[in-house]
Amino acid sequence: MNESLLTEYNVVAVSFEKDDMAYAGLARLKQLDADALIELRSAAVVEREPDGHVTVKDTTGKEEWEATAGGGIIGLLVGILGGPLGVLIGGATGVLVGSLFDLEDEDDTESVLSAFAAKVRPRHNVLLAEMREPSDHEVVDGVMASRSGSVLRSHVADVEAEIAATEKAQREARKKARKELRHEREAKQKADVEAKVAELKAKLPNHRGNVPAGTTS
């Protein structure tokens, strides 16, 4: 295929009726890349554990993306979906905390990460991939449909934007948590010091209530 026809830069998540089809789907994406029908940047077969964390079971990618598990955007996506926030957005509500994003009308806006988190279900293999592909999506969708695969797709730019917002929110949450812990520690230390001082004062001979006869306080 003429490379000029690969006009969309997308991230896809594909779930299958049979888990072993995720590996077959990964193999077919590699073949489509070899045939120049798509440009596969990186891909991974992942599974969400019962505790919410995401395990990477197989990966592929261009050499420059192989430094991280899953590579590039896929590696970041796995990190987000497998972290504490990923557990939250993949839960029963399936929505992101509103404060993560500066949205003019949250009611009319769907979260990309929430959709991906819901796709990565516990105890099921899911194929995640970052690629350039034709705008009609027929090449990838046709291959996945032949293996009973259900495709969720989003533009890379949208995924990157939400990952960036999520990372910022996590940093702010960690900063706030550290600040609160520091205040609690300082308050406890102050209380401990005051209690110790009061204890020592009570033991002093000239402390009020323990003043020897014939003396003044």
Image (spheres, rainbow, N blue to C red):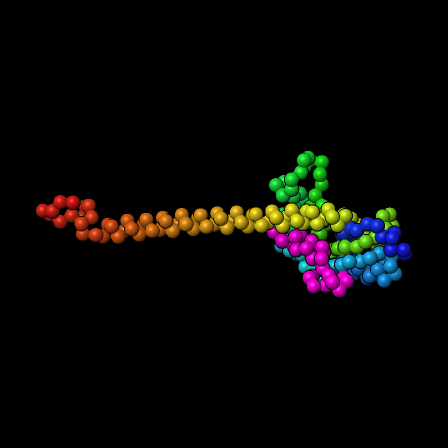
Image spot of residue 71 (x, y percent): 72, 59
| Residue 70 covered by magenta stretch | yes
**Residue 76 counted in the magenta span:** yes
Q: Is residue 58 visible?
A: no
The image position of residue 105, as x and y in percent, is 68, 35
Q: Is residue 116 left or right of residue 140?
A: left
| Residue at the (75%, 64%) spot, across then down | 63
Q: Quadrant of residue 217?
A: top left
Q: Is residue 114 left or right of residue 133?
A: left
On screen, 36 above or below 209? below
Q: For the view shown, which residue lies furthest in the front direction?
A: 4
Q: Residue furthest left?
A: 214
Number of numbered callouts drawn: 0
Residue 96, image x, y percentages? 65, 43
162 or 23: nearer the viewer: 162
Let me know if residue 173 appears in the view. yes
Instruction: From the viewer's side, name the closer residue of 87 and 64.
Output: 64
**Residue at left 64%, top 48%?**
166
Q: Which residues are magenta?
A: 59-84
Quadrant, the N terminus: bottom right
Q: What residue is shown at x 43% (from left), y 51% (from top)? A: 185
Instruction: State the image coordinates of residue 92 (x, y, percent, origin top left).
Output: 66, 44
Task: Locate residue 173 relative to residue 95 in the image: left or right.
Answer: left
Residue pictured at 67% horizontal, 44% vertical: 94
